Amino acid sequence: MKPRICIVQIGVGDLDQAIDWYCNTLGFELSEEHNYHPVAVDLVHEGCRLLLHAADEPARIDYPRVSQTLICVQTENIRGTMQALREKGVEFLHETPQEFPAGLFAAFRDPFGNVHELVELCP
């Protein structure tokens, strides 16, 4: 078998709040094709399926000290995107973009404790 990632699942404590946050704050769109509300919904974007799935407990992630899986959201202008997201109430774990070999990143936490990174890749 050759592995192929087909779905990335994000556990969330309140599916309706997650739909609002991921769509209205981060800019994803809700899929009409894969909507299993109130258990799970897909978000529309380029790439493999991104699924919000109802969970009973919030994530307790000690970023970056513990092993974890996170979503990296690519942007062309990390500073501008950080500013726009801050204006929508997103709290970043980094005050400024951090360098890594392929570009810049800044981590943020969703309302359910999941950590994701905003990434600007080098040209």
Image: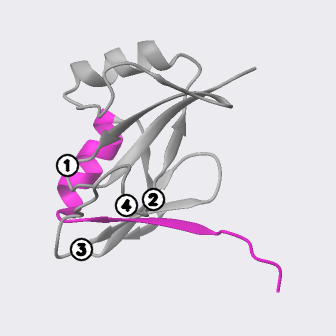
As measured in the structure, the alpha-carbon distance from the residue carrying label 2 to the one carrying label 1 is 24 Å
* Residue at x 33%, y 28% (from the top left corner): 94
Where residue 96 sits: x, y (%)? 38, 18
Q: Residues within 10 Å of mark 1 (few under 14, many from 20)?
A: some
Residue type at the position of mark 2: Glu
Closer to the eye: label 4 or 3 = 4
Closer to the eye: label 4 or 2 = 4
Kindly state the secondary structure of the residue where label 2 is placed: strand
Q: Residues within 10 Å of mark 2 (few under 14, many from 20)?
A: few
Residue type at the position of mark 1: Pro
Where residue 8 sits: x, y (%)? 52, 64
Residue type at the position of mark 3: Ala
Tag on residue 123?
A: none
Pointer 2: what residue? 32
Q: Answer yes or no: do the residues labelled 3 and 2 have beta carbons within 8 Å?
A: no
Pointer 4: what residue? 66
- Residue at the extreme front: 65
